[in-house]
Amino acid sequence: MVLHGSGSLVLLSPLSVCFLSYFIPFSFLRDFNERCAQCSEVNWGLTDGGRFYCRTCHNVTERTRDVVNTEVICNARIQTISKGSRNRGKSEEGWEWYVCEGFQLVLKKQAEALEALGVCPQMKDEILCNFWRRYLQKSQQAYCDRPAGEAVKTLSVCDSSTDMDSEPERPSLLHLLSLSESDGDLQTDCSFASSSGKVSECTSMCSGSVDGKLYLMKNQKEKLRMSMPMTLSLCYMALLWLREPMTLSDLLRFVVEGHIPYLNVYQDFPEKMKLYGLDLKIFCVESWPVYEEVYSKMIELAAFLDLPRFPDITESCFLHPDMLCMKYLMEINLPDELHNWTCRVVKKIGFGEVDFLTLTPGNKSTRKVKYDVLAAAIIVVVLKLLFLLDDHYEWLLSDFAAERNKNNKEGGPYFEFKKWYKVIKRSLDVEQMKLDEERAKYLWRCEKPLFYSVKKKSKVLRRRQMVVNLQNQFGKLSGAVRPAERPNPSSFQLSWSEENTDGTCFHGHSLKGILQEKNSVLTTINPDYWLCTIRLCPEKLCGHLAHYKEVDFPQSYHFVLRLFSFLLRIQPSYIHEEVCVIEHKLFHKKLSKKPKYNTGLRK
């Protein structure tokens, strides 16, 4: 207890009271002889608010006691017990934290999830950690000199003992990402910088973080401001640096399936990192990550960080078109013989070269490769070469193959496009319906309720529990089915087994029915090919090389695009654009000659 000159007595916490007991008599506690309703003991103490609490079971009663004490200061009478300052104490106020620290916790959670999925442990502590430190340095948030002439409120990132002693309860969040002590070539004698005047204003009124308001100001956009989609860009950049067998479409699919923290990830923040106001605008996500946005931000980040050329993508890498084409051919249940044709197309257009596939940040002359989209487009081009996909020729070939299969008693069956189409369409419709239902039923609200005051914590938790109970009761009454458990992560969304006797697996089927041997080389019977577009658009004008409208193209072609659109979780127009680029590369010589009649090319 501390006696104020005004005559009011401020009671400290029980832990603090024990250190001051030799100053203040506690005889008035002996006058309260009621037994504790919880444990029946008579062992009372006083809380900060002037209430009696049981030292044995820590039960707090509603009883209070006015104290008259004349032994401490003569001629001074204590009439009331004050609760002290109305401002929140440090334990209720929480830590003083910055937005970049929140993003660092998000990256840490995402890196740990990727490591649990089988990614190399080197990704978190070496690759991603160094990328993040480099970003903090380039954006002048840390590991840099303090901005000159600016009044700042700082958080030290040094490991000095003085910093640790100044605030012992607050862990060093800047070192949560890395398990190593080495900071490389980055300077560690700098701090986070922000205007102290603006910070104090926005901290108390607009956000729980120190710099939430400043972070959303327009001038921050020039520094490539970090966002939730950009955390996935950083993760994918680290995966690409390590040449991990995970494409960007796989990464985003694992996010949607809940294997990688992204939606409502802020619920895993420490309780003392208060999150409200503008912080929710920064960390709260209410939309699925978009492939094009995450990829473009990754390219911008790589150039912003001045990263060197990435490790080479060679033929043995999973991201090489030959490897990815094999994977997608298996997933969409096409014959194994098609892989020879995809390899021939890759070699013909030069898209398997190391210099083409390897990312060189900042080099605007090189084309940026989307490995999964490129592999899907190559397969589409091969299907057009063999089956034309004009809603006519592929069905004639199917009827021809069906007749030959009736009389075929030796060797594997001939591939029937019509039968494959029916099997895949049935499976695709079912999986697409499941995906649409899951997205429609997804609850964007965070499971863990947010509360911004210790006093309101119990009230918020009770209200949340009441909502959950009501939902469970109405669910039982309506007979609603409980949501299925999260599926195990897998690189394949569609699986086909050759052991099935129903004939739904086409991996071992033969293409001999649609090929002919010419000069010891197998070629297509069909000499024609139709181009998706005769001329590519200048990318600088509209940002796209080609445009896609479903009504302008055959249904068979659209079905194949829709199939890959489902697998990669992207719009069919992105795959169509890549198909147009491959076609113009493949038929460049014939297009450049500009003959009067384009034999072999028809639109």
Image (tube, rainbow, N blue to C red):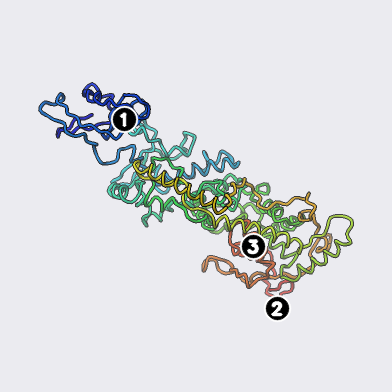
Residue occupying the point 59% across, 53% down: 249
Element on which disc 3 rests: helix
Asked if labels 3 and 2 touch by Cβ distance under 8 angstroms, the answer is: no
Asked if labels 2 and 1 touch by Cβ distance under 8 angstroms, the answer is: no
Q: Is residue 230 left or right of residue 257?
A: left
Pinpoint residue 177: horizontal percent, then vertical percent: 47, 39
Asked if residue 149 shows in the view, the reply is no
What residue is pinned by disc 3?
562
Q: Is residue 359 left or right of residue 326?
A: left
The amino acid type, in three-letter code, at marker 3 is Arg
Task: Give the number of the mark in front: 2 or 3.
Answer: 3
Residue occupying the point 22% across, 33% down: 10
* Residue 472 tag number: none
Toward the viewer: 115 or 426? Answer: 426
What residue is pinned by disc 1?
53
Pinpoint residue 13: horizontal percent, then vertical percent: 29, 31
> How far apart in space, not on screen, are marks 3 and 1 (Cα)?
67 Å
What residue is pinned by disc 2?
596
Q: Earlier in the sequence, mark 1 or mark 2?
A: 1
The amino acid type, in three-letter code, at marker 1 is Tyr
